[in-house]
Amino acid sequence: MREYRIAVYAGDGIGIEVTTEALKALRAVEARCGFRLKTTELPWGSAWSTAHGGHVAPADFLDILRPFDAVFLGALGMPSVVPDHICLVPLIRMRQAFDQYVCLRPATLLEGATTPLAGKGPGDIDLMVVRENSEGEYTATGGHFRVNTPDEVSVQTAIHTRKGVERILRYGFDLARQRRHRLTMATKSNALNYSMVMWDRVLAAVAPDYPDVVSEKVHVDALAMHFVRTPERFDVVVASNLFGDILSDLAGALVGSLGLAASANINPERIYPSLFEPVHGSAPDIAGKGIANPMAAVRSAGLMLNFLGEGEAGAILENAVADVVREGRVLTPDLGGRASTGDVGDAVAARVAVTQPS
Ligand code: NAD
Ligand code: IPM
Ligand code: MN
């Protein structure tokens, strides 16, 4: 039987709640499709830190994770217990150390979900944010000086490499070829006169290799505006780490809820494990209330199965979520319903048993 080793890092807050529900869907689909997921639950996060001297994960956590086929993550962050810039370190370290330089964040408006955009419906939003995930604004390069004095100085340096920009753009172009042959690159070369000017140059150098893809660059501020006004214009949207982070939360809102937005942090060369997680965070504002939408986690699990080569199972998870949204009977409050996290997880798992993969 096909077997995959999955590290389950549920994390904090609603990360733990939605992971429980995604595992129900995964158990249902493995039974149906005839493979086995060997899961190992890792209790790391803010709760773990209270018994481990404030550390949110073991010092050798990357060595522990490396042998797995994939990491499935809920969400990290509980600022009331551990400062965010400490609690989130394992997530950013995984992306960089495991060279997960592609972050795929699909945003498709499902039938039954309500976009906040007037006059838009299913068919109008079907885009993929391709976020550069290994460098840019996230390299933790910088420092503080004269801390807590009126003369305090903070330096935070973004690092953009030609190799890093080129590989994410080529990934985006290849993906556009499998979609609607359109690529938009987020830039800000009118102000960021080194980094984004290089991004523009790399786009100009790479685009001729893909004559069948229509490409453009758009300043990220205007791009945010166009996301709202004319989302139908976008297919593949390639962005730097921070721009992609911001645009993907916006895209999640446009398709009805951040609670639907999935993501895949991919090492395309498969040298290291890839990481699958919802776009959303640990939502301390609703944690423990049983109202978090687990669908983003289920869809992230679907992306994981696709990546592992279990495309039929991945499609079943995606279609099970789409079925439950379309039916509209069992939805959490973010989608206008009154169901609990567990009710939605159960409804999705029940659909997994019967829905068609295509
Ligand atoms: P968040 O994504 O956790 O929440 C933003 C808003 O969306 C909140 O009002 C929340 O209630 C709502 N929301 C998010 N997910 C939802 C779901 N599944 N169902 C229903 N509503 C949902 O972002 P935040 O409030 O900025 O951050 C909270 C914590 O999460 C912080 O510690 C932050 O650093 C962390 N964070 C972690 C990740 C991650 O682990 N990948 C991502 C983003 C934020
Ligand atoms: C995300 C999150 C993370 C990011 C944070 C929690 C470090 O917002 O995955 O989108 O900025 O990448
Ligand atoms: Mn984010």
Image: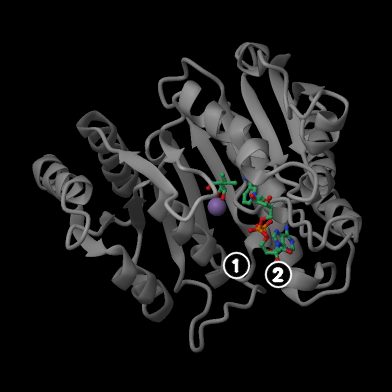
Some atom of ligand 1 lies within 8 Å of the CB belonging to the residue at label 2: no
Q: Residue 170: x, y in percent?
A: 25, 38
x, y (%) of residue 264? 54, 40
8 left or right, relative to 256:
right
Name above or below for residue 276 compared with residue 113.
above
Indicate the position of residue 295 as horizontal and vertical percent values: 72, 55
Q: Quadrant of residue 185?
A: bottom left
Question: In which quarter of the view is residue 252 placed?
Answer: bottom right
Query: Does the rendering let one see residue 306?
Result: yes
CB under 8 Å between callouts 2 and 1? yes
Residue at which label 2 appears: 326
Q: Name the residue located 62 percent from the left edge and 45 percent from the top edge.
A: 315
Q: Is residue 33 visible?
A: no
Residue at image mark 1: 110
**Crowding at label 2, few (<14), some or many (≥20) Cα neighbours within 10 Å?**
some
Q: Residue at x 55, y 68 (%)?
A: 109
Q: Is residue 340 left or right of residue 297?
A: right
Whether residue 227 is situated above or below residue 191 in the rendered picture: below
Whether 90 is drawn above or below 279: the answer is above
Secondary structure found at label 2: helix
Disc sitting over residue 341 in the figure: none
